[in-house]
Amino acid sequence: MPNIAFKVNPDKALEAIVYIAHKLGCVDKYHVVKTMFFADKEHLNRYARPILGDTYIRMRNGPVPSYVLDIINLKEDKISFDVFVKAKAALEVGSDKKQTITARREPDLSFFSDTDLECLDNAIKFCKDKNFDDLKEITHEEKAWKKASINGCMDYELFLDDDNPYKEEIIQDLKEDSLWMAF
């Protein structure tokens, strides 16, 4: 288990999915999880905390935020009944191979800071015109993905860019405070 772990806010995770799907109109599951990865990574590098604090797993096709994926897949054994009901009401997830996602409502922006929305928007812009293979190739170059074992947890320390002047300070703060951070 990595040294830095967070407790994800289930409602904020759902709203992030709704936000991405609402912004894009209709989006496949793969683009949602990759958008979330790039948003969390940027926010961590710029503002010393991720947006969601989800646990990222090294999967064959790149990083996957596990709780976000559980919401999309409506994993009743992994998400609370309350989140299950809210997700069913907020999202339409297609049964097609790509599992296209459409927002059934506007996102509740009260869950997000201005910087959260800035990084989500940047990640949406970055990912939206890239295809599956492009995103796979880009994420397979990520240090955190490369160093994790297959189906293992990715280390948040490795999300930080090597040229980040505050890298060591951020790592130290997160090691001390990550489990107590509220998202």
Image: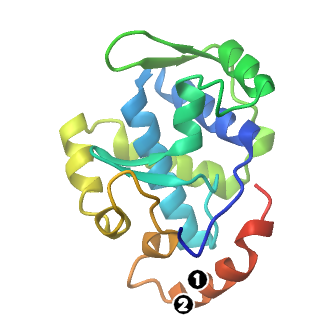
**Mark 1 = which residue?**
171
Hey, what amino acid is under mark 2? Glu
Q: Which labelled disc corresponds to residue 168?
A: 2
Picture coordinates of residue 19, whole percent (x, y): 60, 33
Kindly identify the residue that appears in the image at 69 percent across and 29 percent down. 107
**Closer to the camera in the image, 67 or 13:** 67
Picture coordinates of residue 99, whole percent (x, y): 40, 18
Would you say 1 lies left or right of 14 here? left
Q: Which labelled disc corresponds to residue 161?
A: none
Work out which residue is located at the far top of the displayed protein and give it: 95
Picture coordinates of residue 65, whole percent (x, y): 51, 46
Can residue 172 be seen at all in this image of the molecule?
A: yes
Query: Splitting the image into 4 quarters, where does residue 30 fall?
Result: top left
* Display colour scheme: rainbow
Kindly identify the residue that appears in the image at 29 percent across and 54 percent down. 139
Hey, what amino acid is under mark 1? Ile
Kindly identify the residue that appears in the image at 36 percent across and 64 percent down. 148
Can residue 131 be seen at all in this image of the molecule?
A: no
Please, what secondary structure does the residue beneath circle 1 have?
A: helix
Crowd rating for badge 1 (residues with CA inside 10 Å; few <14, some 14–19, many 20+):
many
Q: What distance separates the C-alpha of mark 2 from that of mark 1?
A: 5 Å
Kindly identify the residue that appears in the image at 29 percent across and 36 percent down. 129
Would you say 126 lies left or right of 135 here? right
Disc 2 and disc 1 in contact, CB within 8 angstroms: yes
Picture coordinates of residue 8, whole percent (x, y): 69, 50
Residue 88 lies, with reference to residue 56, above or below; the image says above
